[in-house]
Amino acid sequence: GENVEQHPSTLSVQEGDSAVIKCTYSDSASNYFPWYKQELGKRPQLIIDIRSNVGEKKDQRIAVTLNKTAKHFSLHITETQPEDSAVYFCAATTSGTYKYIFGTGTRLKVLA
Amino acid sequence: NAGVTQTPKFQVLKTGQSMTLQCAQDMNHEYMSWYRQDPGMGLRLIHYSVGAGITDQGEVPNGYNVSRSTTEDFPLRLLSAAPSQTSVYFCASSSPGTAYGYTFGSGTRLTVV
């Protein structure tokens, strides 16, 4: 079945440094890749997404890249701040199903 | 708009009891899903629905039932609660063509003793 692998499971960076989280998906039909941020005790919230017809998308300090051939996509956070500390989840789905399969999450800690 | 509303927020059940977790959305979204979240295992799909009267199984459907009689509501039923069902449950909704992915409810923390 479909599977999404996410690495690393934990990531600590110094404030101001960059953070990169990587995901790999198994279903070649997947064409929509959202990223969610979940703060402690709260619901997951969408922070950025990318569709399969785009290789990169950027929104201020966050960006997502997609390599369809390798079935990889990554989240890049630049100039990290303490408020970026949270758990980040990637997901993959195929349009028409909206059956999201999530990665297991990355706990990001930004050290002041 | 209230978005996605889940009730209750917290629940303690005894093994073998049954209950229904409620989920309602007021955004006229066609797609709705239930996820459970366990430490280190991310969000796992239990059941999902692409419209009223249509449901399908996700990754971990055993022990749960769903129905979708209206666009707004998507309740999750635990038939006979087990300690392994202790988890945080999230309901989410979306609409085809939306650029904003799933909107999640605030979650239900369920403990089965």
Image (cartoon, rainbow, N blue to C red):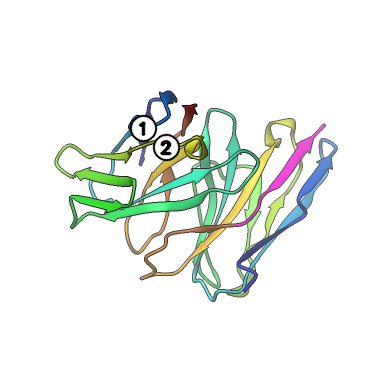
Look at the numbered disc 2 and give the secondary structure of its residue: loop
Chain for numbered disc 1: A
Q: CA distance from mark 2 to mark 1?
A: 5 Å
Q: Are marks 2 and 1 on the same chain?
A: yes
Crowding at mark 1 (Cα within 10 Å: few <14, some 14-19, many 20+)? some
Which residues lie in the magenta part?
B105-113
Identified at 70% across, 53% down, the residue is: B77
* Residue A25 in the figure: left or right of residue B1: left
Identified at 45% across, 47% down, the residue is: A36
- Count the marks: how many? 2
Do the residues bearing badges 2 and 1 touch, measured as CB atoms within 8 Å?
yes
The relative height of residue B67 versus residue A56 in the rendered view (above or below) is: below
Question: Which amino acid does the dot numbered 2 rest on?
Answer: Gly
The residue indicated by pointer 2 is: A103
State which quadrant residue A98 falls in: bottom left
Q: Position of residue A48 (x, y in %)?
A: 37, 52
Chain for numbered disc 2: A
Q: Position of residue B5 (x, y in %)?
A: 67, 63
Identified at 48% across, 44% down, the residue is: A37
* Residue A98 in the figure: left or right of residue B78: left
State which quadrant residue A14 falls in: top left
- Determine if the magenta segment contains residue B108: yes
The relative height of residue A81 versus residue B75 in the rendered view (above or below) is: above
* Disc sitting over residue A55 in the figure: none
The residue indicated by pointer 1 is: A5
Look at the numbered disc 1 and give the secondary structure of its residue: strand
Identified at 22% across, 54% down, the residue is: A52
Crowding at mark 2 (Cα within 10 Å: few <14, some 14-19, many 20+)? many
